[in-house]
Image: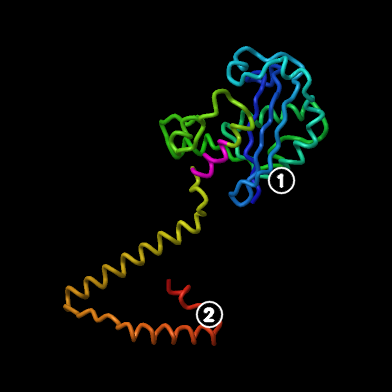
Amino acid sequence: MRQIVLDTETTGIDPKKGNRIIEIGCVELIDRKLTGNHFHVYINPEREVEEGAFKVHGISDEFLADKPKFAHVADDFYAFIKGAELVIHNAPFDVGFIDWEFELLNNGVGKVKQYCQVLDTLVMAKNKHPGQKNNLDALCRRYGVDNSNRELHGALLDAEILALVYLEMTGGQTSLFEAEQAEVKNQSTNEEIFQVKKLEKAFDLPIIKASDEESEVHQVFVKKLAEKSGVNFWELIN
Protein backbone atom coordinates (compact mmCIF):
# COMPACT_ATOMS: atom_id res chain seq x y z
CA MET A 1 0.00 0.00 0.00
CA ARG A 2 1.33 3.44 -0.96
CA GLN A 3 0.67 6.27 1.47
CA ILE A 4 1.77 9.90 1.27
CA VAL A 5 2.10 11.80 4.54
CA LEU A 6 1.39 15.39 3.59
CA ASP A 7 1.49 18.87 5.11
CA THR A 8 1.15 22.39 3.75
CA GLU A 9 1.94 25.91 4.93
CA THR A 10 -0.22 28.80 3.74
CA THR A 11 -0.55 32.58 3.74
CA GLY A 12 -3.55 32.37 6.08
CA ILE A 13 -6.34 30.09 7.21
CA ASP A 14 -9.08 30.57 4.60
CA PRO A 15 -8.59 29.90 0.87
CA LYS A 16 -11.95 31.47 0.09
CA LYS A 17 -10.53 34.78 1.33
CA GLY A 18 -7.70 34.59 -1.14
CA ASN A 19 -5.15 32.72 0.94
CA ARG A 20 -2.78 30.39 -0.91
CA ILE A 21 -0.35 27.53 -0.35
CA ILE A 22 3.29 28.57 0.11
CA GLU A 23 4.89 25.21 0.97
CA ILE A 24 4.08 21.54 0.32
CA GLY A 25 5.89 18.70 2.05
CA CYS A 26 5.25 14.99 1.38
CA VAL A 27 6.98 11.78 2.43
CA GLU A 28 6.23 8.36 1.00
CA LEU A 29 5.33 5.19 2.90
CA ILE A 30 5.05 1.85 1.15
CA ASP A 31 3.74 -1.06 3.21
CA ARG A 32 4.22 1.11 6.33
CA LYS A 33 7.90 1.74 5.64
CA LEU A 34 9.50 5.12 4.88
CA THR A 35 11.04 4.90 1.41
CA GLY A 36 13.09 8.12 1.51
CA ASN A 37 11.12 9.36 -1.50
CA HIS A 38 9.62 12.80 -0.91
CA PHE A 39 8.15 15.87 -2.60
CA HIS A 40 8.97 19.33 -1.27
CA VAL A 41 8.51 22.77 -2.78
CA TYR A 42 8.09 26.41 -1.76
CA ILE A 43 5.57 28.39 -3.78
CA ASN A 44 5.15 32.05 -4.63
CA PRO A 45 1.53 32.73 -3.58
CA GLU A 46 1.28 35.99 -5.55
CA ARG A 47 0.09 37.77 -2.42
CA GLU A 48 1.37 38.71 1.03
CA VAL A 49 1.69 36.30 3.93
CA GLU A 50 -0.60 37.28 6.79
CA GLU A 51 1.09 38.25 10.06
CA GLY A 52 -0.58 35.47 12.05
CA ALA A 53 0.56 32.84 9.56
CA PHE A 54 4.11 34.21 9.51
CA LYS A 55 4.32 33.79 13.29
CA VAL A 56 3.47 30.11 12.85
CA HIS A 57 5.85 29.14 10.04
CA GLY A 58 8.29 32.07 9.68
CA ILE A 59 8.18 32.04 5.87
CA SER A 60 8.47 35.61 4.59
CA ASP A 61 7.29 37.38 1.44
CA GLU A 62 10.92 38.11 0.58
CA PHE A 63 11.84 34.42 0.76
CA LEU A 64 8.94 33.45 -1.50
CA ALA A 65 9.48 36.17 -4.09
CA ASP A 66 11.63 34.05 -6.44
CA LYS A 67 9.85 30.73 -5.87
CA PRO A 68 7.74 29.04 -8.58
CA LYS A 69 4.00 29.62 -8.76
CA PHE A 70 1.62 26.74 -8.06
CA ALA A 71 0.86 26.40 -11.78
CA HIS A 72 4.51 25.50 -12.38
CA VAL A 73 4.60 22.68 -9.79
CA ALA A 74 1.03 21.42 -10.07
CA ASP A 75 1.70 18.59 -12.53
CA ASP A 76 4.60 17.16 -10.52
CA PHE A 77 2.63 17.42 -7.29
CA TYR A 78 -0.42 15.73 -8.79
CA ALA A 79 1.71 12.93 -10.24
CA PHE A 80 3.35 12.32 -6.85
CA ILE A 81 0.13 11.96 -4.85
CA LYS A 82 -2.28 10.49 -7.42
CA GLY A 83 -3.70 7.13 -6.36
CA ALA A 84 -2.13 7.16 -2.90
CA GLU A 85 -3.76 7.36 0.50
CA LEU A 86 -2.97 10.78 1.95
CA VAL A 87 -2.17 10.83 5.67
CA ILE A 88 -2.83 14.35 6.96
CA HIS A 89 -3.27 15.91 10.40
CA ASN A 90 -6.47 17.99 10.26
CA ALA A 91 -7.09 16.94 6.67
CA PRO A 92 -9.95 19.36 5.82
CA PHE A 93 -7.53 22.30 6.11
CA ASP A 94 -4.87 20.97 3.72
CA VAL A 95 -7.31 19.29 1.35
CA GLY A 96 -9.36 22.48 1.17
CA PHE A 97 -6.32 24.47 0.09
CA ILE A 98 -5.20 21.84 -2.45
CA ASP A 99 -8.70 21.72 -3.96
CA TRP A 100 -8.73 25.52 -4.14
CA GLU A 101 -5.36 25.72 -5.90
CA PHE A 102 -6.42 23.23 -8.57
CA GLU A 103 -9.77 25.00 -8.92
CA LEU A 104 -7.95 28.26 -9.65
CA LEU A 105 -5.93 26.48 -12.34
CA ASN A 106 -9.09 25.06 -13.90
CA ASN A 107 -7.06 22.23 -15.43
CA GLY A 108 -9.57 19.44 -14.89
CA VAL A 109 -7.78 17.73 -12.01
CA GLY A 110 -10.81 17.97 -9.73
CA LYS A 111 -11.00 17.52 -5.98
CA VAL A 112 -8.56 15.43 -3.96
CA LYS A 113 -11.20 12.83 -3.05
CA GLN A 114 -11.52 11.98 -6.75
CA TYR A 115 -7.93 10.70 -7.07
CA CYS A 116 -6.78 9.97 -3.49
CA GLN A 117 -8.09 8.44 -0.30
CA VAL A 118 -7.60 10.61 2.78
CA LEU A 119 -6.82 9.50 6.34
CA ASP A 120 -7.11 12.23 8.99
CA THR A 121 -4.75 11.51 11.90
CA LEU A 122 -6.41 14.22 14.01
CA VAL A 123 -9.72 12.35 13.87
CA MET A 124 -7.86 9.11 14.62
CA ALA A 125 -6.08 10.69 17.60
CA LYS A 126 -9.31 12.14 19.01
CA ASN A 127 -10.93 8.72 18.84
CA LYS A 128 -7.96 7.08 20.59
CA HIS A 129 -7.40 9.85 23.14
CA PRO A 130 -10.72 11.65 23.77
CA GLY A 131 -10.56 14.78 25.89
CA GLN A 132 -6.78 15.15 25.49
CA LYS A 133 -4.61 17.45 23.43
CA ASN A 134 -4.07 15.91 20.02
CA ASN A 135 -2.01 18.45 18.12
CA LEU A 136 1.24 17.21 16.58
CA ASP A 137 3.45 18.34 19.48
CA ALA A 138 1.19 16.58 22.01
CA LEU A 139 1.24 13.37 19.95
CA CYS A 140 5.03 13.52 19.72
CA ARG A 141 5.25 13.63 23.52
CA ARG A 142 2.69 10.85 23.88
CA TYR A 143 4.39 8.50 21.43
CA GLY A 144 8.02 9.40 22.13
CA VAL A 145 8.74 10.98 18.74
CA ASP A 146 11.60 13.50 18.73
CA ASN A 147 10.39 16.93 17.57
CA SER A 148 13.20 18.98 19.10
CA ASN A 149 13.97 20.60 15.72
CA ARG A 150 10.41 21.89 15.37
CA GLU A 151 10.72 25.49 16.57
CA LEU A 152 8.45 26.68 13.75
CA HIS A 153 6.05 24.81 11.51
CA GLY A 154 7.49 23.57 8.22
CA ALA A 155 5.66 21.38 5.74
CA LEU A 156 8.39 18.81 5.07
CA LEU A 157 9.56 18.56 8.68
CA ASP A 158 5.99 18.26 9.91
CA ALA A 159 5.24 15.56 7.32
CA GLU A 160 8.31 13.58 8.45
CA ILE A 161 7.31 13.91 12.11
CA LEU A 162 3.69 13.00 11.35
CA ALA A 163 4.83 9.88 9.51
CA LEU A 164 6.63 8.66 12.64
CA VAL A 165 3.67 9.57 14.86
CA TYR A 166 1.25 7.79 12.53
CA LEU A 167 3.34 4.61 12.54
CA GLU A 168 3.56 4.64 16.35
CA MET A 169 -0.14 5.46 16.73
CA THR A 170 -1.11 2.53 14.51
CA GLY A 171 1.17 -0.04 16.10
CA GLY A 172 4.69 0.83 14.99
CA GLN A 173 6.19 -1.47 12.35
CA THR A 174 4.16 -4.47 13.58
CA SER A 175 1.16 -5.35 11.45
CA LEU A 176 -2.22 -5.98 13.05
CA PHE A 177 -2.05 -9.56 11.76
CA GLU A 178 1.26 -10.18 13.55
CA ALA A 179 -0.12 -8.62 16.74
CA GLU A 180 -3.19 -10.86 16.63
CA GLN A 181 -0.98 -13.91 16.08
CA ALA A 182 1.15 -13.02 19.10
CA GLU A 183 -1.93 -12.54 21.26
CA VAL A 184 -3.43 -15.88 20.20
CA LYS A 185 -0.07 -17.62 20.78
CA ASN A 186 0.20 -16.13 24.28
CA GLN A 187 -3.38 -17.11 25.13
CA SER A 188 -2.81 -20.67 23.88
CA THR A 189 0.44 -20.98 25.85
CA ASN A 190 -1.20 -19.69 29.05
CA GLU A 191 -4.13 -22.07 28.64
CA GLU A 192 -1.81 -25.05 28.10
CA ILE A 193 0.27 -24.19 31.18
CA PHE A 194 -2.92 -23.81 33.24
CA GLN A 195 -4.23 -27.19 32.05
CA VAL A 196 -0.93 -28.98 32.83
CA LYS A 197 -0.85 -27.44 36.32
CA LYS A 198 -4.45 -28.55 36.91
CA LEU A 199 -3.56 -32.12 35.92
CA GLU A 200 -0.46 -32.11 38.09
CA LYS A 201 -2.47 -30.93 41.07
CA ALA A 202 -5.39 -33.30 40.51
CA PHE A 203 -3.42 -36.47 39.80
CA ASP A 204 0.02 -35.65 41.18
CA LEU A 205 1.57 -36.79 37.90
CA PRO A 206 5.37 -37.12 37.82
CA ILE A 207 7.28 -35.03 35.29
CA ILE A 208 9.90 -37.13 33.53
CA LYS A 209 12.38 -35.19 31.41
CA ALA A 210 14.15 -36.76 28.44
CA SER A 211 17.79 -37.65 28.98
CA ASP A 212 20.52 -36.03 26.89
CA GLU A 213 20.85 -39.25 24.89
CA GLU A 214 17.10 -39.41 24.22
CA SER A 215 17.03 -35.75 23.16
CA GLU A 216 19.90 -36.36 20.74
CA VAL A 217 18.16 -39.39 19.20
CA HIS A 218 14.96 -37.34 18.82
CA GLN A 219 16.79 -34.49 17.06
CA VAL A 220 18.39 -36.93 14.60
CA PHE A 221 14.96 -38.44 13.87
CA VAL A 222 13.36 -35.02 13.23
CA LYS A 223 16.26 -34.01 10.98
CA LYS A 224 15.86 -37.15 8.84
CA LEU A 225 12.11 -36.66 8.70
CA ALA A 226 12.60 -33.07 7.53
CA GLU A 227 15.05 -34.14 4.80
CA LYS A 228 12.62 -36.70 3.42
CA SER A 229 9.50 -34.53 3.59
CA GLY A 230 11.03 -31.12 2.79
CA VAL A 231 9.25 -29.65 5.82
CA ASN A 232 11.12 -27.83 8.61
CA PHE A 233 9.33 -29.25 11.65
CA TRP A 234 11.26 -27.07 14.07
CA GLU A 235 9.67 -23.98 12.50
CA LEU A 236 6.25 -25.54 12.81
CA ILE A 237 6.53 -26.37 16.50
CA ASN A 238 8.55 -23.36 17.70
Q: Which of marks 2 and 1 is in front?
A: 2
- Give the x, y percent position of residue 33: 60, 49
- Whether the magenta-drawn stretch holds residue 105 is answered as no
- Give the x, y percent position of residue 185: 40, 64
Snapshot quadrant of residue 68: top right
Q: Is residue 109 left or right of residue 148?
A: right
Depth check, front residue: 216 or 15: 216
Label 2, label 1: how many angstroms apart (C-alpha)? 41 Å
Mark 1 neighbour density, 10 Å: few (under 14) some (14–19) many (20 or more): some
Q: Earlier in the sequence, mark 2 or mark 1?
A: 1
Q: In this view, does 57 lie to the left or right of 203?
A: right
Query: What residue lies at 48% left-to-right and 83% top-to-bottom?
Result: 223
Task: Identify residue type, mark 2.
Answer: Val
State yes or no: discs 2 and 1 in contact (Cβ < 8 Å): no
Q: In this view, does 51 lie to the left or right of 147?
A: right
Mark 2 neighbour density, 10 Å: few (under 14) some (14–19) many (20 or more): few
For the rendered model, the colour scheme is rainbow
Numbered badge on residue 231: 2
Name the residue carrying label 1.
Answer: 83
- Give the x, y percent position of residue 135: 50, 29
- Whether the magenta-drawn stretch holds residue 162 is answered as yes
Which portion, as a residue range, is magenta?
161-168
Instruction: Look at the numbered disc 2 and give the secondary structure of its residue.
Output: loop
Q: Is residue 68 left or right of residue 206?
A: right
Query: What residue lies at 50% left-to-right and 58% top-to-bottom?
Result: 177
- Give the x, y percent position of residue 174: 50, 53
Q: Is 69 drawn above or below residue 176 in the view shown?
A: above
Task: Identify residue type, mark 1.
Answer: Gly
Instruction: Look at the numbered disc 1 and give the secondary structure of its residue.
Output: loop
Secondary structure mostly taken by the magenta-highlighted segment of the chain: helix
Q: Is 90 drawn above or below residue 80 in the view shown?
A: above
Quadrant location, the C terminus: bottom left
